Amino acid sequence: LAKTTQPISMDSYEGQEVNITCSHNNIATNDYITWYQQFPSQGPRFIIQGYKTKVTNEVASLFIPADRKSSTLSLPRVSLSDTAVYYCLVGDSGNDMRFGAGTRLTVKP
Amino acid sequence: EAEVAQSPRYKITEKSQAVAFWCDPISGHATLYWYRQILGQGPELLVQFQDESVVDDSQLPKDRFSAERLKGVDSTLKIQPAELGDSAMYLCASSLGRMSGEQYFGPGTRLTVT
């Protein structure tokens, strides 16, 4: 099981771009990188998944360097409603991925 | 949009009592997960099913916890007897297959043991 390291918390302001970096030095060849978002008293919600380079969807972008030892979740122009905990998971299947403590993002007006 | 259903949403029980949680995954999802989330921490995987079979229950405290998915559809997680330390959010998630990293979570059951 690849271990991940993320900042415990981050602050930002509305309208700014937020980048959350996750370190996963022992990522395996078959592992994917997956990010989830969780609001208080709700279950986590899938945001994005990638293997290498860059992946973009309507919510976020995921940047993965060539060595894949880290990844960066980019949230463009955040709003107050983006205040949540963001989790980075690494693994090749559902039971291979583990949630860590996540990054608590606070967006201020 | 299809959702994972869980009940009850909230449960208060006394220690040493039995408690059960129910989960109905998204139709067609073969893989089902039960997680426990203590306040301030990330979800911890308790058990994973592929259809009706247990794939991973390495983190399930088997002396008091049990889980079943008899027909490969809905699932029940039981705790007997409940202990004070079991107070947590119990989350159910499902995915199309065990290789899928995209899991769909239900709203959870908030358990308080007194």
Image (tube, rainbow, N blue to C red):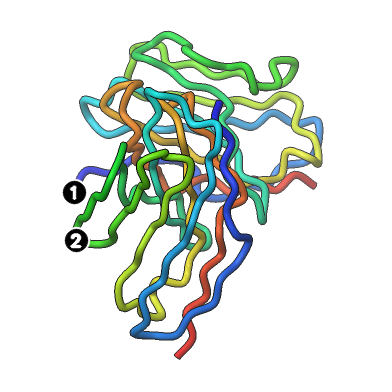
Could you tell me the amino acid type at mark 1?
A: Glu
Q: Is residue A28 visible?
A: yes
Q: Is residue A93 visible?
A: no
Q: Is residue B7 above or below residue A11?
A: above
**Mark 1 packing: few (<14 Cα in 10 Å), some, or many (20+)?**
few
Residue farthest toward the top in the current orientation of the protein: B53
Compared with B14, A105 (above or below) is below
Mark 2 crowdedness (10 Å alpha carbons): few <14, some 14-19, many ≥20: few
A96 relative position to B27: left or right:
right
Instruction: Choose mark 1 or mark 2, whichever is in front.
Output: 2
Choose between B3 and B44: the one closer to the eye. Answer: B44
Q: What is the secondary structure assignment of the residue under circle 2? A: loop
Q: Residue at x 30, y 40 (%)?
A: A52
Measured as percent of width and height from the top left, residue B93 is found at 41, 36
Residue A91 falls in image quadrant: top left
Q: Which residue is mark 2?
A: A58
Q: Amino acid at mark 2?
A: Glu
In the rendered image, the vertical position of residue A32 relative to residue B107, given as above or below: above
Q: Which residue is mark 1?
A: B1
x, y (%) of residue B25?
A: 33, 32
